[in-house]
Amino acid sequence: MCLTMAKKFKFYSADHLLKDFPDAQYYVIYGERSNGKTYDALSRGLRNYSKTGDQFAYLRRWGEDIRTKNLSNLFSGHIENGFLKSIFGDEWNQIYYRSGKFYLERRDEDGTITRDENPCGYAFDLNGMEHYKSTSFPRITTIIFDEFLSRNGYIPNEFVLFQNSLSTIIRHRDNVKIFMLGNTVNQSCPYFQEMGLTHVKKQKQGTVDLYTYPNGAKVVVEYAESSYKRGGKASDVYFAFDDPELNMITTGVWEMNIYPHLSIKYRPKDVVANFFIDFEGELFHGEVVVLDTGHFIFLHRKTTPIKNEDEDIVYTTKADERWNYKMALTKQTDKLSLFIMKCLRENRIFYSSNEVGEALRNYVMWSDSYSIKN
């Protein structure tokens, strides 16, 4: 059975995107892990270098991500499966990485090493791009931002850092393709908001959306088809357990925790306070409930306007002059905010759905990372 699945499985390729949308600037591709997204993008970078001498940039979030120990084997698959030989023949048979640069090498049986004098690509991290502001990269025509989706939060003002990084590399050119690759680990993402990718949370697997902008920019967004529809991966046999979070690995559905749901009923008079969270274009309503048996918070989506908008506390991500609008829940010291955090620690917040639980989780992470420098 495993051998059959392996034969049927076909790794991801973005050929169809480049064919159907050749004039797009951004290609946002997300889906299950280990389906070949990164391999495909790196293959394009190598192929371009073999044909035209154009280089690629491999972009990650943290400096740790691009250290030699983490990237020295980035192209091991391309070497082992013969891809490198298929485009360079016997000229190069290895890729050497050091100090943020990838070099083609030929290692002969007698131990002789011949290295290309020019790097075929570079590695950058968002935090370290300040060091390259005075450097020019005119031959980079492919930018690969790998793992742009994060389960553990983002750098403050990360989208601005990303745009600054692109500006450093691209300068005044218009011949650069940007591939943003991610696993379906978190629907909450500053890139979706900042780029106006409004349909991502509702997008179906196997579909492609095109976003166009007044200045002529085009962003192609693909929710990559699950490998199950292509026969599945042989490795799926190792993840066949009854845990919803494992579905992201094997089918590409969004990773999501299981959050406590309310199992009792309460009456309107049991609600002693209300608050709201305005986060990523959605509004969530928190009701503080006190019963004879104890207290808790019930959090659900708010689909109608706030009735007492001049009185009820609203937690946001944007500065607001109104007294009842507060930024960064975890940085507040008033009684309600402290009570909410106490309920969170004690697992006394109940959610109308797991998606609502994810929203609070991501808002708390954003609050933790917020600083006055924002």
Image (cartoon, helix red, strand yellow):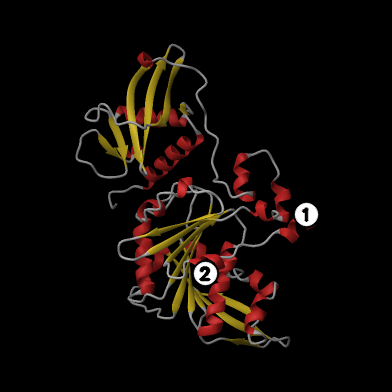
As displayed, is residue 282 above or below residue 147? above
As displayed, is residue 298 above or below residue 83? above
As displayed, is residue 69 above or below residue 189? below
Residue 257 at x, y = what percent? 54, 39
Taking depth in this image into account, of 17 and 130 the one nearest to the observer is 17
Taking depth in this image into account, of 323 and 299 the one nearest to the observer is 299
Residue 247 at x, y = what percent? 62, 45
Q: Secondary structure at mark 2?
A: helix
Q: Which residue is mark 2?
A: 19
Q: Mark 2: give few (<14), some (14-19) or many (20+) Cα within 10 Å.
A: few
**Image point (35%, 70%), residue name:** 167
Residue 169: quadrant of the picture: bottom left
Name the kind of residue labelled 1 in the image: Cys
Q: Which residue is mark 1?
A: 2
Q: CA distance from mark 2 to mark 1?
A: 33 Å
- Toward the top, the furthest residue is 292
